Amino acid sequence: MKIKSKPLEILIQTIFQKAGCKKIEADRIAEYLTRASLVGHDSHGVIRTPRYVDMIKDGHIVPNVKPQILMDSNNFSIVDGVDGFGQTVGPFSCMLGIKKAKKYGNSIIAVKNSGHLGRIGDFSEMAAAKNLISIHFVNSIAGLLVSPFGSWERRFSTNPFSAGVPIKNNNPFILDFATSLVAEGKAYVAHQGGKAIPKDALINDKGNDTNDTSVLYGTKDPNAKSSRGGTGALKPFGLHKGSGLSFLCEFLAGALTGSGMGREDKSKPFRNGMLSIYINPSKYVSGKDYNDEIKRYIKFFKSAKPIVDGNEILMPGEPELRNKNDRLKNGIPMTKITWDAITETANYLKIDKNLITKCL
Ligand SMILES: NC(=O)c1ccc[n+]([C@@H]2O[C@H](COP(=O)([O-])OP(=O)(O)OC[C@H]3O[C@@H](n4cnc5c(N)ncnc54)[C@H](O)[C@@H]3O)[C@@H](O)[C@H]2O)c1
């Protein structure tokens, strides 16, 4: 089925307001989740709504927090997300990093105790819109899902990495991915009957590759809510290289921020840590030489012959822009299970049924 994005954003906004968020926070959560769905990252989009509402109900996330700056210097700050929504903590820390990099040329912002930060590329886009390069390393405690290279036992979260580079008179370069072969949300979409994941995306407790998502959720039930039940794991992308990058995310986003590195404590709620680096190129390089070199290279990059005739070589960020244009016009594709879960949450919160029907 296809869902209209604007009424969907209003529905999601209303859900979060009813669930206890002030309008300004509910607006922000709805905007970020809808945008992730629009750009094609359904795993980090509106599908998260029922889980986030459950987290409020269970006291695992605190609505309406004001993130605290624990330590502040010209180029390095530590932000405590005080267990609030990632859609509040993430933009707060990103705006701080942007302000500092504009003034001092570069900045590093360490974030701890944040709720799920969602699509990390949002922060690369925010910085690029202000003409800044940014690099983001993310980890999580209590979200063990991924095995290190050579094992099936979980030692990492899906530890995403993102980077953005603004390009004069062009859309920015936005690289944004989980360091697992597929993001957990994509396994969840497959578990619910959506797009299948690659045959070697998971590993079972015998050390064999599989795409049977029950090794993650511990059940074939498509409504399984927890990924903690299974005895297998998601595999890191790129063999030992992805495993190494994920480890680096643990150091930077877990240890350096004080958020904590991965651990086997099932009693702790999910928290993201994030270390972001912001660079203001205009403070360091000559605008013309820098921009001309980038322009030349993009042309060269794009001139590579495609393997399949008629295909195009895309820059990171381009698939998301194309999805956004298509989905704004034609609606967001969604499985019935995902839509039913969202409407069930809306009904539980006694939300006006018209807001639901307007989405269809
Ligand atoms: N908050 C968290 O804890 C958390 C954890 C994991 C993932 N995530 C988010 O999940 C989302 C999905 O991650 P993913 O690993 O599924 O992403 P993915 O595998 O779809 O990769 C996306 C990246 O690859 C680029 N790309 C895709 N196809 C391309 C092509 N044909 N040519 C050139 N570039 C191409 C995209 O532009 C993008 O930069 C991301 O937004 C990530 O930040 C968040």
Image (cartoon, rainbow, N blue to C red):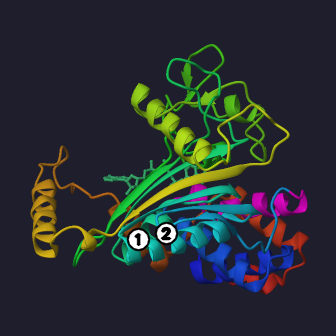
Q: Residue at x 80, y 70 (%)?
A: 63
Which mark, residue 97? 2
Q: Residue at x 66, y 71 (%)?
A: 88
Magenta: predominant secondary structure element?
Answer: helix
Residue 49 figure quarter: bottom right
- Residue 109, compared with residue 25, is above or below; it is above
Q: Return the x and y of residue 79 as percentages of the image width and height.
A: 64, 63
Q: Is residue 235 left or right of residue 280?
A: right
Assign the N terminus to one quadrant of the image. Answer: bottom right
Q: Is residue 138 left or right of residue 278?
A: right
Number of disc labels? 2
Question: Tag 2: residue type?
Answer: Gly
Label 1: which residue?
A: 101
- Residue 169, compared with residue 298, is above or below; it is below
Is residue 49 shown in magenta?
A: yes
Q: Which residues are magenta?
A: 41-59
Circle 2: element type: helix
Q: Return the x and y of residue 273 as percentages of the image width and height.
A: 62, 51
Q: Return the x and y of residue 89 as percentages of the image width and height.
A: 65, 67
Is residue 2 among what the camera can see? Answer: no
Q: Residue at x 21, y 54 (%)?
A: 311
149, 198: nearer the viewer: 149
Residue 84 figure quarter: bottom right
Question: Tag 1: residue type?
Answer: Ala
- Residue 69, compared with residue 276, is above or below; it is below
Residue 196 figure quarter: top right
